[in-house]
Amino acid sequence: MTIPFDGVPLHAQRRLIEELADLGYTDVWSAEVNGADAFTPLVLAATWAPSLRLGTAIVPAFTRGPATIAQSAASLAQAAPGRFVLGVGTSSDVIVEAWNGIPFERPYQRTRDVVRFLRAALAGDKVAEEYETFTVQGFVLGLRLGEPVPILVAALREGMLRLAGREGDGAIVNWLSADDVRRVAPIVERAGDGSPKEIVARIFVTPTADPDTARAIGRRAITAYLNVPVYAAFHQWLGRGERLAGMWRSWRDGDRNGALGAIPDDVVDELVVWGTPEACREHIERYRANGVTTPMVALLPGSDPAQAIRDLAPQ
């Protein structure tokens, strides 16, 4: 499950997170966009629900210095031994450049370099290295970890997917259909050394059986994400260019309502899980059947989180 839950203050989420563990959920994964940071909700969850695995999906490779990422990751890994997974990725030009004032340059190289640095730093090595996108001079992490921290790479298209398989312990994927997984997951596996790779998919869910409500919520989420250049390029690559062309054109013209109306129903139905609880669980299971090892539910705004986590609980 993706945390924190929308519309609930962080201090008031304890009951929900404790209930996740009681209902049979195995993991909680944070997101970092324009709300909570990636680490604080997981620190709370580590204390409130000691059985849950904790993951960041994702920490941007640009918005913190490499040593700061290592410090934050090591702190959480030491607080929750054996339960923390570090997900890193490029994030997007909107978050990195427009919101944080950091040039969004060479995102592939930056993420690769951060992963390489983190491997060494989290292992306790002294790092004195001139990477392609930054230089570290003599950093030694002051925390010692009892076991390695798995590092996953957020990936959309082939280059990052191969990086996730080659230098990461797996990939975190986002905004794709269950059928798209059959194209994406094998790229990660082929790039690796033959060892199993974790494929974590954030799956957007609105548990309502009313198609008009579900599609209206889904369209708002799709326009918020798929007009960001990295996601637009991803869906061009996946083959949705023609079906999303009207949305992109209206969005560029400043016609927000036109962009919403231009998204075909079948695109919403592919990218957003909706329906009865049984239909939602069946749709989520299709992701797993096609190669996802860790389905990560993200409740879209409008859901009652307390009811949704019960309705969607693993059977």
Image (cartoon, rainbow, N blue to C red):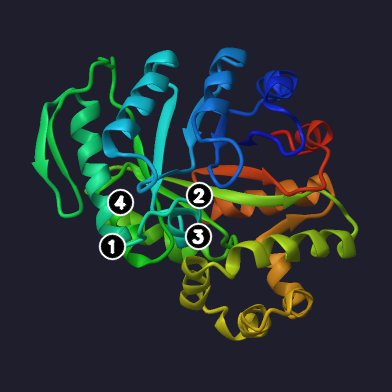
Quadrant of the drawing holding the C terminus: top right
User: Mark 2 or mark 4: which is in front?
Assistant: 4
Q: Residue at x 18, y 22 (%)?
A: 124
Q: Nearer the viewer, mark 3 or mark 4?
A: 3
Q: Quadrant of residue 106?
A: bottom left
Q: Amino acid at mark 3?
A: Val
Quadrant assignment, res 87:
top left
CA–CA distance between discs 2 and 4?
Answer: 22 Å
Contact, mark 3 vs mark 1 (Cβ under 8 Å)? no
The residue where tag 3 is placed is 94
SS class, disc 1: loop
The alpha-carbon separation of the residues under discs 3 and 2 comes to 28 Å
The structure residue drawn at horizontal position 87% and vertical position 63%, both measured from the top left corner, is: 211
**Going 45% across and 50% down the picture, which residue do you hit?**
100
**Element class at badge 4:** helix
Asked if residue 194 shows in the view, the reply is no
Reading the chain from its start, which is encountered first: label 2 or label 1? 1
- Give the CA separation, mark 3 to mark 4: 17 Å
- Label 3: how many residues lie within 10 Å, few (<14), some (14-19) or many (20+)? some
Tell me what residue is drawn at x 57 percent, y 44 percent: 295
- Residue highlighted by disc 2: 292
Residue named by callout 1: 106
What's under tag 4, amino acid-wise?
Thr
